[in-house]
Image (cartoon, rainbow, N blue to C red):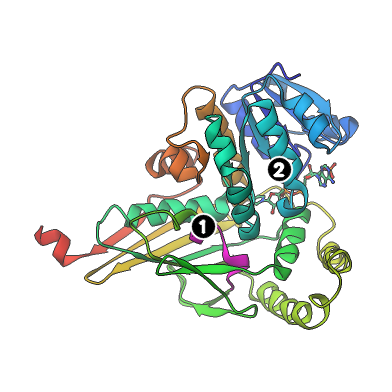
């Protein structure tokens, strides 16, 4: 049974250790949980400033029963063990059974859809938050979208998220795992399936060179805005700035369509996981704000108006670690704005999350331009 209010599950990963770092900055005691106590200690010993953090190490089996036992007594679970479609259910079930709010860092649309359908009402019935996807991909873009939507009358979101860097082991596994899933955009409030090989040349704010963007498994945005009465249409695309990486993903997508999708599920999963591991088996270096930059750009339009918001930032894994730590910090002091399934902005407010990211120097002041003459005339 946990005697600390927050559990970081998957603390040994690239993102988990950043959550530990930011929880220390919020002076919040936590349980550092994972499948190997020795490895947790080795990893945490290297977290900057960890000597001032209040934490306990917990080795736990990846089963609902063992996780429930560990989570009991805590208030918030921050889950970093992905891909979530593969490893998420045990941690969500355990959070629900133990009476904890649940957050994770996923960027998998299929997991968002599954989590909402399977557990949304159950968490709401217990006054608990189920917020999968509090992470740079896609919370920062959600903040930009909501800044646009402060202008009424805009019902269509065209969202772009790009970052500079190389994905971690689990992120690469995730990018590959979503290639076999169906993924959707929102059209007049209905889910419409993207063609598996969809891609686009996109104009990136702040530079002359175009970039290549992919639907990246559909992203969380169509799911988050599905029940938002302001919004009817959402298309989101993204990826990394490095065109060679993106071209590689396009080629792999074609191979997946032709050769891997027809395989039995277990064989397909293994083939994808092996391909992902061959591309990334190590740990990328700690992020450098001069190199690892992010751009979130949202065009919001309606019949008579348009708004555009751009948020330039840096260190997308740090943004993710901070957003997770802030969510926990908020939840142990005050209830979320919404129980059950909710995005970061729906649970905590987009202006609040923007302020948090800005106060730690991870995003710039958003550039918001509004052209909505009918609104201005009032
Ligand atoms: N949307 C976003 O912007 C965003 C940002 C950051 C991360 N993420 C997502 O968050 C997840 C974690 O990312 P990461 O960068 O931290 O990856 P990572 O460095 O590879 O870490 C993965 C973590 O999961 C644990 N794990 C893996 N398989 C496990 C299993 N079978 N049982 C128990 N624990 C297991 C690992 O433990 P060991 O150390 O014991 O192997 C490690 O703690 C990924 O799915 C990634 O896509 C998303």
Is ligand 1 less than 8 Å from the beta carbon at label 1?
no
Residue 170 drawn above or below residue 253: above
Is ligand 1 less than 8 Å from the beta carbon at label 2?
yes
Crowdedness near tag 1: few (<14), some (14–19) or many (≥20) residues, C-alpha within 10 Å: many
Residue 240 appears in the picture as rendered: no
Q: Is residue 295 left or right of residue 49?
A: left
Taking depth in this image into account, of 22 and 88 the one nearest to the observer is 88
Residue 208 position, x and y percent, is: 46, 77
Taking depth in this image into account, of 113 and 310 the one nearest to the observer is 113
Q: Specify the quadrant of the image occupied by residue 28.
A: top right
Badge count? 2
Q: Specify the quadrant of the image occupied by residue 302.
A: bottom left
Residue 226 position, x and y percent, is: 45, 58
Residue 13 appears in the picture as rendered: yes
Residue 245 drawn above or below residue 286: below
Residue drawn where x is 69% and y is 26% of the image: 98
Q: Which residues are magenta?
A: 214-222
Where's the N terminus, which quadrant?
top right
Q: Which mark is residue 80?
A: 2
Inter-mark Cα distance, 2 to 1: 21 Å
User: To which residue does mark 1 refer?
Assistant: 223
């Amino acid at each position: 049974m946990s005697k600390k209010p927050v559990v970081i599950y998957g603390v040994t990963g690239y993102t988990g250790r950043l959550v530990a770092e930011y929880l220390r900055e919020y002076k919040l005691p936590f349980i550092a949980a994972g499948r190997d106590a020795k490895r947790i200690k080795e990893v945490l010993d290297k977290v900057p400033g960890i000597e001032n953090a209040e934490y306990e190490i917990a080795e736990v089996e990846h089963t609902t029963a063992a996780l429930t036992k560990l989570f009991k007594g805590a208030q918030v679970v921050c889950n970093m063990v992905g891909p979530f479609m593969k490893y998420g259910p045990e941690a969500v079930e355990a959070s629900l059974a133990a009476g904890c709010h649940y957050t994770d860092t996923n960027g998998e649309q299929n997991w968002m859809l599954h989590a909402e359908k399977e557990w949304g009402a159950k968490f709401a019935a217990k006054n608990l938050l189920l917020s999968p996807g509090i992470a740079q991909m896609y919370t920062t873009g959600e903040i930009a979208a909501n800044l646009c939507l402060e202008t009424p009358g805009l019902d269509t979101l065209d969202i772009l998220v790009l970052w500079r860097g190389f994905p971690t082991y689990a992120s690469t596994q995730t990018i590959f795992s979503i290639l076999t899933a169906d993924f959707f955009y929102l059209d007049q409030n209905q889910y419409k399936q993207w063609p598996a090989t969809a891609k686009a040349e996109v104009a990136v704010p702040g530079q002359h060179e175009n970039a290549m963007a992919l639907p990246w498994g559909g992203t969380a945005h169509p799911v988050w805005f599905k029940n938002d009465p302001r919004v009817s249409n959402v298309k989101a695309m993204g990826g990394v700035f490095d065109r060679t990486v993106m071209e590689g993903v396009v080629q792999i997508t074609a191979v997946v369509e032709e050769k891997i999708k027809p395989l039995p599920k277990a064989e397909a999963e293994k083939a994808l996981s092996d391909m992902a591991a061959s591309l990334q088996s190590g740990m990328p270096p700690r992020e450098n704000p001069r190199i690892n930059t992010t751009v979130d750009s949202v065009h919001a339009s309606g019949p008579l108006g348009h708004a555009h918001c751009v948020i330039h930032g840096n260190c997308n894994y740090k943004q993710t670690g901070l957003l997770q730590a802030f969510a926990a910090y908020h939840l142990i002091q005050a209830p979320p704005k919404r129980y059950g399934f909710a995005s970061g902005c729906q649970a905590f407010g987009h202006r609040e999350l923007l302020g948090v990211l800005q106060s730690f120097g991870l995003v710039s002041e958003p550039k918001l331009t509004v052209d909505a003459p009918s609104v201005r005339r009032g």
